[in-house]
Amino acid sequence: MENDPLEPVSKSPQEILPTIEVQHISKRFPGVMALDDVSLQFFPGEVHAVVGENGAGKSTLMKIMSGAYIPDSGDIYLGGEKVTFNHPQAAQLKGISIIYQEFNLLPERTVAHNIFLGREPSRFGTMDIRQMNKKARDVLKEIGVEKMISPSALASSLSVAEQQLVEIAKAISFKAKVLIMDEPTAALTYTEVGLLDDLIGRLKQKGMSVIFISHRLREVFDIAEKITVLKDGKFVKTVSKKDVAPADVVYLMVGRTLDHYFPPLGKPEDFGEVVLKIKDASNTLLQGIQFELRKGEVLGIAGLQGSGRTELAQALFGVMPFKSGSMELHGKAIAIRNPFKAIRNKMGFVTEDRKSEGIAPRQPIRDNMLLTVRAIQNLFGVLLKDGIRKSRKLVPMLGKQVDIKTDSYDREAQYLSGGNQQKVVLAKWLASDADVFIFDEPTRGIDVESKAGIHDMIRELTKRGIAVLMISSELPEIIGMSDRILVMADHKVAGELPAKSSENEIMLMATGHSNAVIQNAASSGKE
Amino acid sequence: MTTATVTANGFRRVLRSIHIPPVYFFLILIFIAGGLLDQVFADGQIFSNPAIMLNIVVRSVALGIVAVGQSLVIIGASIDLSVAYTISITAVMSSYIMVGKTENVPMAILGVFGIGALIGLANGLIITKLHVNPFIATLGTSLIVKGIINASFSNYTGSVPKSFEYFGYGKIGPIPVSIFILVIIVMGGWFLLARTKFGSHLYGVGGNSEVARLSGVRTDRVLIIAHVICSMTAVLAGLFLVSQMRSGAPWVGPNGVYDLNSIATTVIGGTALAGGKGGVWGTLGGVLIFGVLETVFNQLGVNPYIKTFLQGAIIVLAVASYTIRSKKEAA
């Protein structure tokens, strides 16, 4: 840790001036107290994680610290001096940079344009593009990725991880003293997370305060030194990593231990006949796919980013259909050429990208739930009186089944938390009577408690005789949920593993070489 | 790798580095097709007479000028439906003030640019501060301006002095002044978009307004400025038209369908209606396509309704081809 040069190193952090401090911050949104009298300090050269369930107020706090929201009450101190931010730019100028959860790049602009958006270098009143590219290269060099990313590349041509790095470069370029990252690792693979680790280490060395929000506790423990827990908008506790175990933190977040994290796996007598059988199926993105899915089981699909996991789901559901090979549903040969046909054949697809593919954000919860039913029934029939009466009963019933927390089903779906939105998507497919469910990253970006709820629900589905195919990049989830595990590598099925296989076994198969040293293997195990 | 492929790749790289918008492919295709038809069915002047070629551009001047402004607001994910009546009010007001006297010209020009700035400012403020959808906001101002014109003028009003006609009919050497003006406006539009902070911010606002705001861009201000510039281009187009017509008529804007045509040519040029992507060179290509169509149909002397039909087909074809292309790239 690098201390203020004027201070003796032996002093405890309490005597060092915090880089940034919030005192008694409160913020109310319509119907909810997002933050309630929260006070926190962040010190230079320190990596500080803020954890809590969705709705705990983490993101709101970060947005207040970065000037995107104005608090109802409370103060912000920067290096001991009271500040007020009424625009994100004001915070940036004071050295506070934030990287938001959603990607914040303009896809059609170059890396350099993205990094310097809003403060492009100019000369004689015109933008100096050469200078901008040069400065962008310098910033990329500062974080050690100048060989990976060209300043003149379009943002849309970069991978998700590279885009994340550009965002960090952008944040650094503000001469930031405080770097706030909201879920920086949510979209990254394990190796990419490693890259981020190194980077954060280097920023720390420079005396920067790094604050980050994450749902992945393992990363919190890998990266952070201090962990602050928020719950329901209130401050719970700040702990040092070395004093606690992950289970303690989860306990602080949700008030229960990790043991209940995953529901018990299915028993052999739970599994029924083969529902879905794929043989030698290929399309432009997949080769020779072959597997069987049984009634009542969860078949986990593991694999690295780009191995074809999501493409498999899309092929099965007819989004990018198979071009060759055979597919049998309930023993009958079938070709699913489009999603409509998949739905007609009682398949349900809970997509990875909730926001753009799962829910209609401005539609009420009610209509979201009924979307699929209405799509496959007579176009006008459902809207007749009878249909409306039926839907009046159906919606609360579904809501209860999936346990959506809302005061009204007429509320627009966009106001629900991520976990509750996912439940709406689930309800949508339940309404359509689907008996084959495909989940693509069912709990990405969802807090621990809702996660457990969704896992319980997936298991509940299998007890009703539904066959579940679950794609996930989180190995603990794959291991905790799957009755069998299919591992994908290089657009093919690399092999099948039994329930409770270790992360090591899965990673070996996914990477395709047997003596690979698996990162994080030591710290893994059942979370 | 053979030398041929190396050169081909090099050539492609050069092409890509200068970013020729794909619309020019359509333009050349339509020009050749039109010229061939002209060879077969008419006097073949499209290919042989340079004056006709110049005329294609001259025809495109008014639309080209407005379309540059329209491109700016569309890149900012906005739209301006009020340009047609801004052109009309410019035409009638300027010739009303000039009444054929050269000494009144500066006052007239100042007056109409003032009016234009006011309309653009109103558009921008209504969209950014009152949060009215741009389509509705500019439709509203358009109707307001239309009402004012119809209440005050019903026919040709005033006239422009001989000196002012230079704008519409003058020549520098063999080339009409108006072509220079079009080129200057397009270059100006390009410069604004590609070489100024304003342009960069406008792409940001159009691409993702929230991202731009969080990056410190004063998004409202940027969009308001874009709308003011757009209305100014409409004023300039109106001045050009009135100098050609010699007297302002209230129907000049809507008769030329400058609102929808400027949007159409912008979109044909490859600017995304959703904003954040595109440029004025593409728009110029779109405008020239309309100019070529007009000239070809004039030459052939066939039913002008077919021209409208073709314009519609080209809009659909061009935009569909861009979407398919970008999908392929994505896959």
Image (cartoon, rainbow, N blue to C red):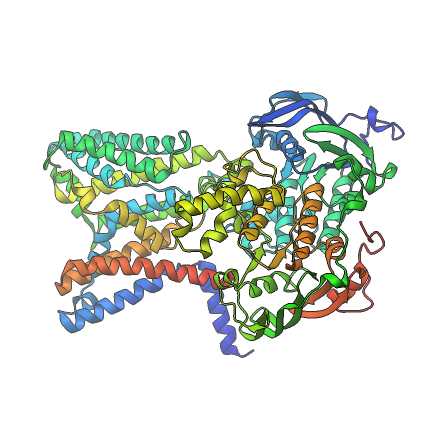
| Residue A441 x/y as whole percent | 65, 53
Please give left or right for residue A47 compared with residue A98 in the image. right
Instruction: Residue lying at the far right in this picture: please name it.
Output: A10
Q: Determine if residue A154 is in view.
A: no
Quadrant assignment, res B23 = bottom left
Instruction: Name the foreground residue: B170 vs A313.
Output: A313
Instruction: Name the foreground residue: A317 vs B249.
Output: A317
Residue drawn at point x = 40 percent, y = 54 percent: A379
Please give left or right for residue B225 compared with residue B10 in the image. left
The answer to whether residue B80 is above or below residue B21 is above
The answer to whether residue A506 is above or below residue B104 is below
Instruction: Residue lying at the far bottom in this picture: please name it.
Output: B2
| Residue B90 x/y as whole percent | 21, 36
The answer to whether residue A514 is above or below residue A113 is below
Q: Determine if residue B56 is in view.
A: yes
| Residue B98 x/y as whole percent | 14, 32
Instruction: Name the foreground residue: B60 vs A53.
Output: A53
Q: Quadrant of the N terminus of chain A?
A: top right
| Residue B284 x/y as whole percent | 32, 53
How many numbered circles does the render carry?
Answer: 0
Residue drawn at point x = 81 percent, y = 52 percent: A526
Quadrant assignment, res A271 = bottom right
